[in-house]
Structures are given as C-alpha cells and as structure tokens.
Image (cartoon, helix red, strand yellow):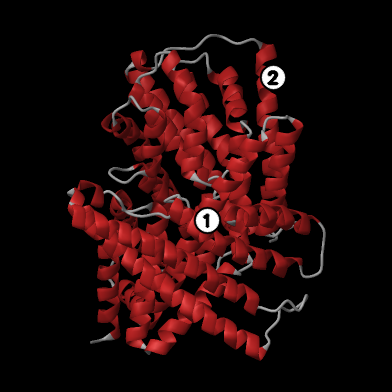
C-alpha cells in the first residue's frame, strides 16, 4: 500500500514539477505526507528504521527478548499518542476548516491519514511486543 | 529541578533507550514529548507531537529527500556505477594501484548523482571488489578504499546529510550542496594519494592492470558523460537558481530514469526495487528528522543549546580549539552511533554555540559532513564497513577496518585543511544566486 503511494507520489511529483501547475508545491508536500506516513509501517516490517544494535547483539538471548519487548512497548506508546493526538488535531482543523493557500485543499484528511497510519503502526508494534513476550516466557 | 537539569536527564535517558535498541527516530520523538510534557504541561507536550509530525511530514522543503533518494536508487538499479568504473578503469588501470584509484574516481563520480554513503559504497563495492580481487589486490586495500571512498557520497552533492543539516539549521540546501564540491574533489585526491603512498611502500598489494587501447578509453568516456549530464542538470540548475532543491531532485530523478530507459538498462523488477528502496530510505530519514525536531523543541524549552552556547563563548579558548573538541566529540560519537542519528541529535544542541563563536554555518555543514564520513567508516558502528562486508563476505571485519585506517587519516587531514582555509568550502556558495 505504501509502495503504491510512493510510486504514484514520486511520478506525479516529478510530472507536477516539470510543468508549472498552480498549487503544485502544496500538492507535492501533501503527497510527501501521505507517502511518509504510509511508509512507516512498511519500513518497520523491513527493519528499515535505524537502531543501535551493537550493544543488544552482545547480550544473551533472553535479555534481548526483554529489551525487544520494552522497546516495542515504548514505540507503541509513542504511536498510540500520535494516533490519538493526530485525530484530535485533525478534528480541530476540520472544525476550523483550514485549507491550503492556492488549491484550497483541506488539511484534515491528511492529518487523519497520519492518525490512521499510526494506528496501523501501533497494531504492528503490538504484535511485535506480544511476540517478544512469548519469547521471554518460553526461554 | 532546573530546566537545564531536566534537559540533561532527557539526553541521558535518550542515549540509554538508543542503546537498548529502540529505533532512534521513535526514541527522540518519545523522549522529546515526555520532556516537553514535564517542563510545560501534559497538553502542550502532546499537541506539539501532532503538530510537529504534521508540519514535518507535509513540509515542502522535506520533499527534496525522496527526490534525491529516488535519483540515487535509479542510478544504482540501472548500472551507472558499472559504467563509471569502466571509465575509471580504462584511464587508470595500467598504473600500480590504478584499480583502487579508479574505484575512488568512480565513487566520486557516483557521489555526484547519489546522496548517500552506503548506497555509493554498495553500488561501487559490488562492481569494483570482484575486479580488484581478480587482479590480486590485497583485501584490506580493496575493501578499505571502497568503504572510505563510498563516504564521498554525502560530501559531493547531492547529499542527504546536507539536506538534513540544511533543514535543521534553516540554511539553504543549494548553498550547502555547492559548498561540498571543492572539499569533495580535494578529499578524492587525498584518497588517491593514500593509495599511491600505500602502493609505494608495499608494491605487492596492488599489481598493475592490463593496458587499454585509446578506443576503449573513448568508449569508457560515455560512462562519465551521462553522470556529467545528470550532475550538470540538477546541481548546475540548483547553482544557477533555476531549480529549488526539490525541483532539482525531481529533474535528476527523471533524468536518471530517462537515461536508464534509453539505455534499456533497467528492468520493471529493477524499477520496483528502486522505488521500494527509495521509499524505505525516505521514510527512515523523515522519521529521524521528525523525531529530532520534537526532541529539538524539548531541548529548546530546556534551554540546553543557549546555555551551552553561552558557556562555550565564555570559555577562554581559541575558536579552533573549540572546533577541534567538537570534531573530536563527533569522531568518538560516530564510533558508537549511527551518523544520521548522531547529527540530528547534536545539531540542535551544538549549532547555536558554533554560530555564537562566529563560524560560518555553511562551512560548519561541510565539517559536519566530514565527521559523518568518519562516523560511517569507524568501528564498531560503521555502516559502510558492514555494507562492504555484506559484499565481500569472506573478508574479516578487522581486515576492512585496518584497510580503512589510512583513509581516515586523509579525512582528518581534510578537516585540518578546511580549518586552515575555510574559503575552500565557502567560495562557491558565495557565488550562488539561489
């Protein structure tokens, strides 16, 4: 899903940029927002987010699992908060009716998009957390 | 508790959760929000979370990242690295150590169309390592020179590190890009001198290659040509003020794609892979930048950067000594942390102090890139080294690190040169119209 968004985003972005389309800049920026938020989950699955591994790698397996559970729980808190607050923020923008300058594109659907993606990432992190817990118990 | 003390605790907590393996972007965001909540109010902290994430994700200036990342992954997928190397090889292959020099030249060329160190190292490593092995080059020279020269990817524009630095410090990305040109050329030459010195001391590590005909040399030149066209299009366009950075990236990515299509050197599968790759890298960078923004806001309310700036400018130390200390901190920090994470974390803290001392912000950007280059090749956390290890699986890590050491000396020498002659970095940007 995220991949599709990027393909569309990049190609449209390039096409938009090669011709002066009114509001092209804001559309590209919005596409950037869509692409990034949808890509977070994909990147998480592919282990693409930078993390410091060299300490953890040297620890025994069980402790590794405990730490994995802890870090996914912390990440889960972060994305949980982000989902909640982005939803709230989206509500505010929707009620005040904020739109972009040239094309009058409303902001709130994109902010809701971030909220939605955060929920997806949270669910993913929840499964990672549970998996790590199972590992801790098993070992 | 004073605000500064809370800030220091925040930094300590952050380093701890980095070390237990939490993704750095998430960690900076979480600690930033928690600290902000503590210092201001719960509600203020949480609303800064939603606002910062939205502001960064939807920022037009950040759309420059996917554009240049995409350009690099297309160039990689369509085999431009191989053609550049062929060109370098036909020119320099006959010399002793010529293959290693050709590798450095090709890395510099690829760096002109790709903005990341590990992509440059991966692209060139896959092409050059088998060749150097075939001609009997020593493993440590071969792997060391690709790993080190791969780091040119972020010094010669385009460069993800310059983009991130430009965004964090609100400096012009176009000026930063052109600032990297001369230091990049100098560093490439220094790297080649290192090869020459090593070969002179011990000729057995790098036998000479087979001679090539003029015809082959001319054919090789076409490989350089496409790189030059792309570079002229996007960096030249940026330099002359035709393009905004995002437009330059888009033009470059489109150009790379067109060249790949005309040459028929990219398959549908390769294209999809390039897009996926670009997507992951983009997201990774965006998440870190966003996390760093939130953390930076926390640092700002904790007054750490201002206090540090005041403290440093009150010190009775010469400017160069302070800069030396900062470089040293990065050198040590870069050993243990990912370079991108390190700079996004530290720039908001160090930058005001550096400016208070009267250093040029563009010049400091170049210095940051140089220390980042050191970071990606120093043990135990050196991304480039692991990239090379992934290609040359039979070479032990120690051998690669040993091979890198002389090149690290060249990097430090380059920092010294820039300290003595800052104009090398600041001359070109002073000419830009953008």
Residue B162, numbered circle: 1
The 10 Å Cα crowd at callout 2, few under 14, some 14 to 19, many 20 or more, is some
Work out whether B373 lies above or below B20.
Answer: above
Say left or right for B301 vs A98.
left
Q: Determine if marks 1 and 2 fall on one subunit.
A: yes
What separation in Å lies between label 1 and label 2 (alpha carbons)?
34 Å
Tell me if residue B306 can be seen.
Answer: no
Residue B60: image quadrant is: bottom right
In this rendered view, identify the residue nearer to me: B110 or A26.
A26
Tell me if residue B297 can be seen.
Answer: yes
Dot placed on the residue nearer the N-terminal end, 1 or 2: 1
In this rendered view, identify the residue nearer to me: A139 or A89.
A139
Residue A105: image quadrant is: bottom right
Residue B418, numbered circle: none
Residue A77: image quadrant is: bottom left
Q: Secondary structure beneath disc 1?
A: helix
Work out whether B290 lies above or below B87.
Answer: below
Q: Chain of mark 2?
A: B
Q: Chain of mark 1?
A: B
Say left or right for B259 vs B6.
right
Rendering coords of residue B283 (x, y %): 52, 57
Q: Secondary structure beneath disc 2?
A: helix
The residue wearing badge 2 is B219
Task: Give the quarter of the figure containing the N terminus of chain B.
Answer: bottom left
């Amino acid at each position: 899903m995220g991949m599709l968004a990027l393909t569309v985003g990049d190609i449209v972005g390039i096409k938009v940029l090669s011709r002066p389309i009114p509001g092209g800049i804001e559309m590209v920026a919005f596409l950037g927002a869509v692409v990034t938020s949808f890509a977070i989950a994909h990147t998480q699955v592919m282990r693409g987010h930078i993390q410091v591994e060299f300490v953890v790698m040297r620890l025994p397996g069980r402790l590794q699992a405990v730490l994995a559970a802890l870090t996914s729980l912390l990440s889960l808190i972060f994305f949980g908060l982000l989902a909640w607050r982005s939803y709230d923020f989206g509500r505010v923008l929707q009620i005040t009716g904020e739109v972009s300058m040239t094309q009058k594109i409303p902001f709130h659907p994109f902010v809701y998009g971030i909220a939605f993606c955060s929920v997806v990432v949270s669910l993913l992190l929840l499964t990672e957390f549970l998996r790590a817990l199972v590992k801790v118990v098993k070992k | 508790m004073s605000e500064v003390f809370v800030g220091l605790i925040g930094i300590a907590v952050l380093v701890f959760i980095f070390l237990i393996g939490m993704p750095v972007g998430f960690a900076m965001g979480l600690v930033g929000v928690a600290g902000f909540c503590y210092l201001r109010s719960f509600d203020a902290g949480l609303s800064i979370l939603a606002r910062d994430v939205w502001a960064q994700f939807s920022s037009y200036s950040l759309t420059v990242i996917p554009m240049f990342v995409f350009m690099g992954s297309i160039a990689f997928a369509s085999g431009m690295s191989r053609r550049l190397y062929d060109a370098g090889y036909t020119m320099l292959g006959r010399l002793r150590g010529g293959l290693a020099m050709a590798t450095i030249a090709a890395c510099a060329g690829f760096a002109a169309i790709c903005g990341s160190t590990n992509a440059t190292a991966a692209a060139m490593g896959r092409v050059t390592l088998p060749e150097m092995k075939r001609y009997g080059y020593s493993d440590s020279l071969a792997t060391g020179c690709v790993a080190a020269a791969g780091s040119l990817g972020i010094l010669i524009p385009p460069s993800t590190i310059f983009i991130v630095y430009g965004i964090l410090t609100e400096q012009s990305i176009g000026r930063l890009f052109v600032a990297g040109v001369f230091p990049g050329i100098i560093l490439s030459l220094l790297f080649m001198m290192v090869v020459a010195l090593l070969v002179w001391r011990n000729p057995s590590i790098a036998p000479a290659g087979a001679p090539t005909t003029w015809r082959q040399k001319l054919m090789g030149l076409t490989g350089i040509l496409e790189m030059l066209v792309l570079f002229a299009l996007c960096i030249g366009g940026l330099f002359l003020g035709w393009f905004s950075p995002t437009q330059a990236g888009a033009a470059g990515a489109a150009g790379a794609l067109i060249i790949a299509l005309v040459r028929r050197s990219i398959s549908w599968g390769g294209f999809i892979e390039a897009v996926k790759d670009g997507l992951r890298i983009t997201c990774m960078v965006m998440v870190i930048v966003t996390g760093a923004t939130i953390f930076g806001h926390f640092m700002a309310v904790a007054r750490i950067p201002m206090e540090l700036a005041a403290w440093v400018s009150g010190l009775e130390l010469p400017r160069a000594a302070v800069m030396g200390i900062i470089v040293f901190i990065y050198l040590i920090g870069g050993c243990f942390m990912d370079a991108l994470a390190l700079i996004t974390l530290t720039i908001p803290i160090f930058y005001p102090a550096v400016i208070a001392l009267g250093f040029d912000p563009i010049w400091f950007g170049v210095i940051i890139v140089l220390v980042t280059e050191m970071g990606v090749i120093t043990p135990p956390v050196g991304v480039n080294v692991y990239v090379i290890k992934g290609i040359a699986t039979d070479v032990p890590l120690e051998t690669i690190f040993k091979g890198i050491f002389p090149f690290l000396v060249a990097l430090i020498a380059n920092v010294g040169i820039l300290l003595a002659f800052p104009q090398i970095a600041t001359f070109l940007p002073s000419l830009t119209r953008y």
